[in-house]
Image (tube, rainbow, N blue to C red):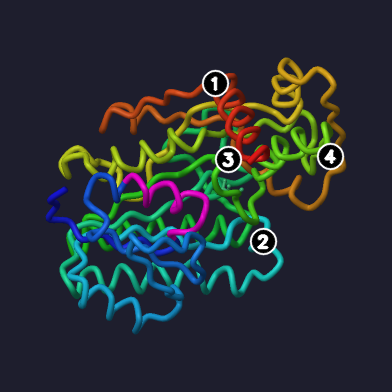
Amino acid sequence: MASNERILILGSEGQLGSELSVILQQKHGLQNVICSDIRNGKPEADRRFMELDVLDAEAIEQVIISENITTIYLLAAVLSAKGETNPNFAWKLNMDSLLHVLNFAVKHKVNRVFWPSSIAAFGPTTPRDFTPQLPYMDPTTVYGISKLSGELWCQYYFNRYGLDVRSLRYPGIISWKTPPGGGTTDYAVEIFHEALKKNEYTCFLQENTALPMMFVDDAIRATIELMEAPAESIKVRTSYNLAAVSFTPGELAKSIQKRMPDFKMGYKTDYRQAIADGWPSSIDDSAARKDWGWNHQFDTEGMVDEMLDNLKKQLLG
Ligand code: AKB
């Protein structure tokens, strides 16, 4: 397929990148999508892949120049729970990579940049229910602090240099092809694997901790729709609230039990409970719905069906 876009994905092998890269390749052609990560998860001959460390500024700049990159998706990040085990490194990786990309995008006239923010940018003082687009924000994790700071950097580069940088505050993403790594919402993926393998799961969050979540297909579609929207419809240059569903571990367990009546759920909380306690339970994403037409498709039941059906097939080979 002919495309004028030359796309660089930094962090292409992670939970979002591994699925977003396939859709971008279908839309723009294999040769126009350069996948990169510190490790190659899918050694296929027919796609473009480069081993690239997002902290290696020189290497990133070289690729932008040599591949005439027009669009960058920066997806590499240290997530909330893992970030707390090494806060300095999480800050360095999350912030340095963003600043390198923003600087090179301006310098080499890249048309558009995507950078993910998160519900982790909110904090305990933020209203928890139906969290508005611009409430008081006091993140408590280094990941959340990096997301809030990064949002402001994105807005700064838009205001100061006219860089078309776009962002979404993702809720917890539920996927079956590639697992998440190091997040507080990871329980909502682990539970499906353990249900199918052992018929039981011990959750690290309390039964009644409600968090905003989204099936990966919706998350990928939101990303593409945001990036394809006309620039004049993008009114938020920090990051858009984005929502689909909201549930507690107890509700998710019940939903699985409807399909697997013998499934048993236990609870043993750890340090991730305190992180979740500072996050919203549901999100008001009316700005995204109004500005560029966002609409989620998967409710909790639809998502549970997709997860169990696909993971069953995957586990059975
Ligand atoms: C995490 O739990 O850290 C992530 C997120 C909500 O950004 N899934």
Q: CA distance from mark 4 to mark 3?
A: 19 Å
Q: Nearer the viewer, mark 4 or mark 2?
A: 4
Question: Furthest-bottom residue in view?
Answer: 58
- Does residue 315 appear left or right of residue 215 in this picture? right
Question: Furthest-front residue in view?
Answer: 317
Label located before the other in sequence (1 or 4): 4
* Residue 153 visible here: no
The residue lying at 33 percent from left, 27 percent from top is: 289
Q: Nearer the viewer, residue 245 or 12?
A: 12
Q: CA distance from mark 1 to mark 4?
A: 23 Å
- The residue beneath circle 1 is 302
Q: CA distance from mark 2 to mark 1?
A: 29 Å
Type of amino acid at the residue the image marks with label 2: Lys
- The residue beneath circle 4 is 202
Label located before the other in sequence (1 or 3): 3
Q: CA distance from mark 4 to mark 2?
A: 19 Å
The residue lying at 52 percent from left, 74 percent from top is: 92
The residue lying at 40 percent from left, 41 percent from top is: 220
Q: Which residues are magenta?
A: 12-23
- SS label for mark 3: loop
Find residue 188 and report its image quarter: top right
- Does residue 7 appear left or right of residue 45 in this picture? left
The reply to whether the C-beta atoms of the residues labelled 4 and 2 are less than 8 Å apart is no
- The residue beneath circle 2 is 82
- The residue beneath circle 3 is 176
Q: Nearer the viewer, mark 1 or mark 3?
A: 3
